[in-house]
Image (cartoon, rainbow, N blue to C red):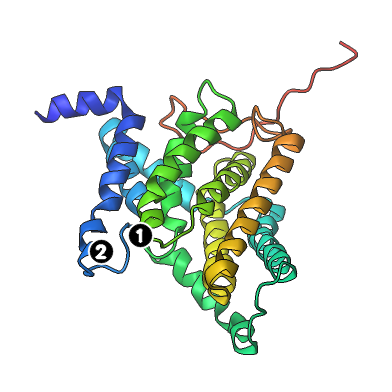
Amino acid sequence: MMSHISRKVNRYPLITFFALTYALSWWPWILYVFELSPQPIVGFGPFLAALIVLGITRGKTGVMTLLRRMVQWRVPLKWYAIALLLPAAIALTATGCNLLAGAQAPSAAEIGGWTGLLPTFLLLLLVPGIGGAWEEPGWRGYALPRLQVGRSALSASLILWVGLVVWHLPLVIVGEIHWSDTIFLLGFVVVFNWIFNNTGGSVFIIMIIHAVNNTISGDFFGPMFSGADSVRQSWFTAAIWCAVALGVIIVAGPKNLSRQHTKQEETKQFDAPSPPVPTKVPNPAA
């Protein structure tokens, strides 16, 4: 029986990953309906699914490779700057647009909540299941390098976006997030994959930007608005993330989402994280 399951997983690893991700993430939905769980979804489901599939298909080596990606902190400083500042810039811009469109201005007490940003960020980054950072070892650490095999980085991003939209559906259905967040995820995925491909497949830097975004947009600016103002804030945020993603595609190119490096792909060496590989530029003198 186990050998049959192992053969199926080895034959369809990505399908198995997504199926397990949904199963391991959505099980609290029933508890949520009966008010026995605060959320209808478990955030670290993609990580658990990746560990299971890697354990079956690659063994200890594959699991350790994923764990190394999660602590791969040696990346150029500019990517830390982008991870820390880009979500804040987008949230501030969306908030400014919302206020100009007539949203009620936040109170002094709400603005004063910035003092709690650092503890919130550390909580979301370090504690599995709180926030979205612990999704990333599954989405970026496992799924993306496989989706990018034989596809452009942009095509892989669109497929991963569909997977993430499906994963978030319970949150949309119960009203935890707006439908606009399905559009926001499109920009989110492209920008994250751009960073991933340019940092040699570092899941660590992706976990940081995810935690920063959830801290800034979700826990700071988000609660400042309610009703129509909240919906409009979500749409502004989604539009700006997509605008940034469009800029990334134009500047970095759809093939690798990078002009300097090739996209991260699954390798025969058990998916060892690889340093960014410079893209070959034709020599006009040749």
Tell me which residue sits at (46%, 51%) in the image. Answer: 70
Looking at the figure, which quarter contains the N terminus?
top left
Give the number of the mark in front: 1 or 2: 1
Label 1 Cα crowd, 10 Å radius (few <14 / some 14-19 / many 20+): some
Residue at the farthest bottom position: 109
Q: Quadrant of residue 30?
A: bottom left
Q: Position of residue 101 (x, y in %)?
A: 72, 67
Residue at 80% across / 18% down in the picture? 282
Which residue does the numbered mark 2 point to in the structure image?
Answer: 32
| Residue 195 picture location, percent across and down | 62, 45
Kindly identify the amino acid type of the residue bearing the numbered disc 2.
Tyr
Using residue 83 as the reference point, say whether residue 173 is left or right of it: left
Image coordinates for residue 76, horizontal then vertical, percent: 68, 51
Residue 282 in the image: above or below residue 258? above
Closest to the observer: 192 or 185? 185
Please name the residue shown 39% across and 43% down the image. 166
Specify which label sits upstream in the sequence, 1 or 2: 2
In screen coordinates, is 182 left or right of 167?
right
Amino acid identity at mark 1: Val
Q: Are marks 1 and 2 in contact (CB under 8 Å)?
A: yes
Location of residue 80 in the rendering, given as x and y in whole percent from the top left corner: 65, 57
Mark 1 secondary-structure assignment: loop
41 to the left or right of 215? left
What label does residue 174 carry, if any? Answer: 1
Residue that appears at 37% across and 44% down: 64
How far apart in space, not on screen, are marks 1 and 2 (Cα)?
Answer: 9 Å
